[in-house]
Image (tube, helix red, strand yellow):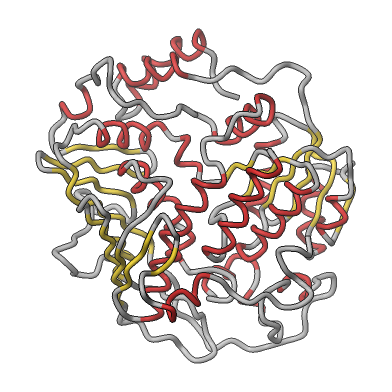
């Protein structure tokens, strides 16, 4: 729940003392905060994907509604979730959840390749959806979600919670208002992935529906390392840390640019990584360079950073984060920290007519505020789609190994039909956008 003004002001001084955020910014945040949820307004919620991330999201959602249904293809995940919500109904197939007319909200904590179909099914069945990031597996999937959100009038919140973090909002507001001078470059630093294998196929565990887990992806023999936490290191199901952490930090890059509903015009990528036969198939190390129509460049490196265009780690050697570089200096932001080349960049208040960004200090609360008000969430489908698209573009450039030109309005590669084939992936029957 978002703090009301009185409660916020009581704690703003303490927050300023305990963080690197200036008091002027904390006080102004109170003026823009959204209304708290009405007492007694507790919608029924279904959790689809009951792993650790899903259970964490559902625990946050349970502050604003009632968890009445649990769905997962793995009985062990459901058993863990039942410890928290013993009275919730249990499902293995998410389509049965959508048949429940009493469920108003879905929390999707599945693996990445299920995000789109679950979200489409939820919106089409009249339910609002909080979906983990990255919102999509492909750029085409995001286009379907944006269209469905508009057609159904449902609320979708992407779990890119840095949009609801004060450090990141302050950094983006300062950059968009020219605090560091004309923006020239954005450096995004992500954790490197994992290079392991080969792995051995085995029989799926009892209580685990391997075929349903794979869903629309190509059928392969069960390999334990393809599931749960390490699914994100396989091309079939994710894009490695580029889409996992990239969906967070590249989202902030777009926000600071003011291009969160657009994208770059060119992408160039390289990686010297060699896949281990029979092992993980997503790039573990990479360097990607984006260029935007306004001339700003944006590099995205796995850490430790590859030496490309003079890129270096952030000023304090942090593992990942975002560095905005302008004509007059820089601002560095990561979780729990914001720094600047000149302290006054942070301490000097913005002018009264400055560009201000939407305020959310609690990502899940913002979602439920939107469910009640029917106003878009801070990370609605278009935002989540564009943030994921930047990551997908980088992965495509890595896999093709050459520079690509992109039209962010048409969402097509320019004069490159081979590259355009990578905007979508064929779904394994019987799954399709229409099947849900």
Question: Which quadrant does the C terminus fall into?
Answer: bottom right
Task: Give the residue displayed 56% in from the left and 64% down from the top.
Answer: 140
Query: Residue 127 versus residue 239: which sits nearer the camera?
Result: 127
Residue 266 falls left or right of residue 50: left
Percent position of residue 93, x then y: 84, 61
* Image coordinates for residue 211, horizontal then vertical, percent: 78, 76
Q: Which quadrant holds residue 329?
A: top left
Q: Is residue 361 above or below residue 380?
A: above
Q: Is residue 405 left or right of residue 396?
A: left
Q: Nearer the viewer, residue 185 or 161?
A: 185
**Residue 50 visible in the shown view:** no
Image quadrant where residue 173 sits = top left
* Figure quadrant of the N terminus: top right
* Residue 156 to residue 408: above or below: above
In the rendered image, residue 241, in percent from the top left (x then y), is placed at: 45, 64
Q: Is residue 234 above or below residue 258?
A: below
Please give left or right for residue 415 compared with residue 65 in the image: left
Residue sticking out furthest to the left: 328
Write the residue at 53% across / 76% down.
235
Q: Which residue sits furthest bottom?
A: 277
From the viewer's side, name the closer residue of 406 and 139: 406
- Residue at (69, 39) in percent of width and height: 154
Figure quadrant of residue 169: top left
Is residue 239 visible in the rendered structure shown here?
Answer: yes
């Amino acid at each position: 729940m978002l703090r009301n003004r009185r409660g916020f002001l009581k704690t703003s001084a303490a927050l300023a003392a305990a963080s690197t955020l200036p008091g002027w910014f904390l006080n102004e945040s109170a003026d823009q905060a959204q209304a708290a949820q009405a007492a007694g307004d507790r919608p029924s919620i279904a959790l689809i994907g009951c792993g650790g991330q899903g259970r964490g999201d559902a625990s946050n959602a349970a502050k604003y509604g009632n968890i009445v249904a649990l769905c997962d293809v793995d009985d062990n995940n459901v058993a863990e979730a039942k410890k928290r919500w013993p009275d919730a109904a249990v499902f293995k197939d998410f389509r049965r959840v959508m048949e429940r007319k009493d469920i108003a909200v879905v929390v999707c904590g599945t693996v990445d390749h299920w995000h789109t179909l679950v979200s489409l099914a939820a919106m089409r069945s009249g339910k609002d959806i909080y979906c983990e990031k990255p919102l999509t597996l492909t750029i085409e999937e995001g286009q379907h979600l944006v269209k469905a959100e508009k057609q159904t009038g449902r609320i979708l919140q992407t779990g890119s919670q840095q949009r609801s973090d004060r450090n990141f909002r302050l950094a983006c507001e300062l950059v968009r208002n020219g605090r560091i001078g004309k923006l020239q470059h954005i450096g995004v630093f992500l954790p490197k992935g994992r290079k392991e294998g080969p792995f051995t196929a085995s029989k799926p565990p009892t209580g685990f529906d391997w075929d349903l887990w794979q869903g629309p992806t190509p059928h392969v023999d069960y390999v334990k390392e393809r599931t749960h936490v390490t699914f994100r290191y396989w091309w079939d199901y994710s894009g490695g840390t580029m889409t996992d952490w990239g969906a967070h930090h590249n989202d902030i890059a777009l926000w600071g640019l003011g291009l969160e509903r657009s994208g770059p015009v060119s992408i160039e990528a390289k990686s010297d990584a060699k896949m281990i036969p029979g092992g993980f198939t997503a790039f573990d190390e990479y360097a990607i360079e984006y260029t935007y129509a306004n001339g700003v460049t944006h590099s995205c490196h796995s850490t430790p950073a590859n030496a490309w265009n003079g890129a270096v780690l952030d000023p304090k050697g942090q593992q990942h984060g975002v560095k905005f570089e302008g004509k007059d200096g820089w601002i560095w932001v990561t979780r729990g920290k914001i720094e600047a080349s000149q302290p006054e960049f942070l301490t000097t208040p913005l002018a009264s007519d400055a560009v201000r960004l939407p305020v959310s200090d609690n990502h899940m609360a913002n979602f439920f505020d939107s469910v009640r008000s029917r106003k878009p969430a801070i990370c609605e489908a278009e935002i989540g789609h564009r943030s994921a698209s930047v990551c997908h573009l980088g992965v495509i450039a890595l896999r093709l190994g050459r520079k690509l030109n992109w039209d962010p309005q048409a969402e097509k590669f320019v004069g490159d039909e081979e590259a355009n084939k990578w905007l979508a992936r064929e779904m394994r029957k019987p799954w399709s956008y229409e099947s849900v």
